Amino acid sequence: MLVKIPELLTKEEVAYCHEVLLKAQWADGSITAGHQSTKAKNNLQLPENSPECQELGDIIMAALARSNLFMSAALPAKIFPPLFNCYQGGQSFGVHVDNAIRQVPGTPVKIRTDVSMT
């Protein structure tokens, strides 16, 4: 099921996130790739423990929490913190299988990730 959630973020939130992402220090995206997808993942990613990733993740999580459409469509028991990826100069994430179970950074908590968004 595909669900479009218009204006999930406010215009101000989008502008702020864009500004932060432009200034951020990106790392090799393969660090979060699973064993099977590590060869297919060729991109950049904000390190999960970076202040930028945590701050922007909080903004996204707050937006999801206030979205009745998201809550009713996804019915989430838990929400995995978002990952931020960047593709430049021919980079791509080739054919792969998404990791169905992810460990929340810095915790022993593992979450099944059935819903993804872009």
Image (cartoon, rainbow, N blue to C red):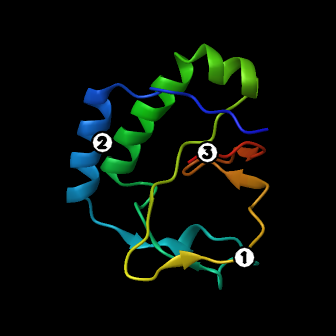
- Tag 2, which secondary structure? helix
Mark sitting on residue 117: 3
Q: Residues within 10 Å of mark 2 (few under 14, many from 20)?
A: some
Q: Out of 40 and 69, give the one closest to the viewer.
A: 69
Of tags 2 and 1, which is closer to the observer? 1
Question: Between disc 1 and disc 3, whose residue precedes?
Answer: 1
Q: Position of residue 62 (x, y in %)?
A: 46, 24
| CA–CA distance in space, label 1 to label 3 | 17 Å
Q: Is residue 64 above or below residue 68?
A: below
Q: Position of residue 68 (x, y in %)?
A: 61, 14
Q: Position of residue 3 (x, y in %)?
A: 68, 33
- Tag 3, which secondary structure? loop
Q: Going by the image, does 37 lie left or right of 58? A: right
Q: Residues within 10 Å of mark 1 (few under 14, many from 20)?
A: few
Q: Is residue 31 above or below residue 54?
A: below
Question: Between disc 3 and disc 2, whose residue precedes?
Answer: 2
The residue shown at (44%, 26%) is 7
- Quarter of the image containing the N terminus? top right
Question: Between disc 2 and disc 1, whose residue precedes?
Answer: 2
Residue designated by label 2: 17
The number of numbered discs placed on residues in the rendered structure image is: 3
Residue contact at pointers 3 and 2, CB within 8 angstroms: no
Q: Position of residue 94 (x, y in %)?
A: 65, 78
Tag 2: amino acid: Cys
- Tag 1, which secondary structure? loop
Residue designated by label 1: 95
| CA–CA distance in space, label 3 to label 2 | 17 Å
Q: Out of 50 and 14, give the one closest to the viewer.
A: 14
Tag 3: amino acid: Met
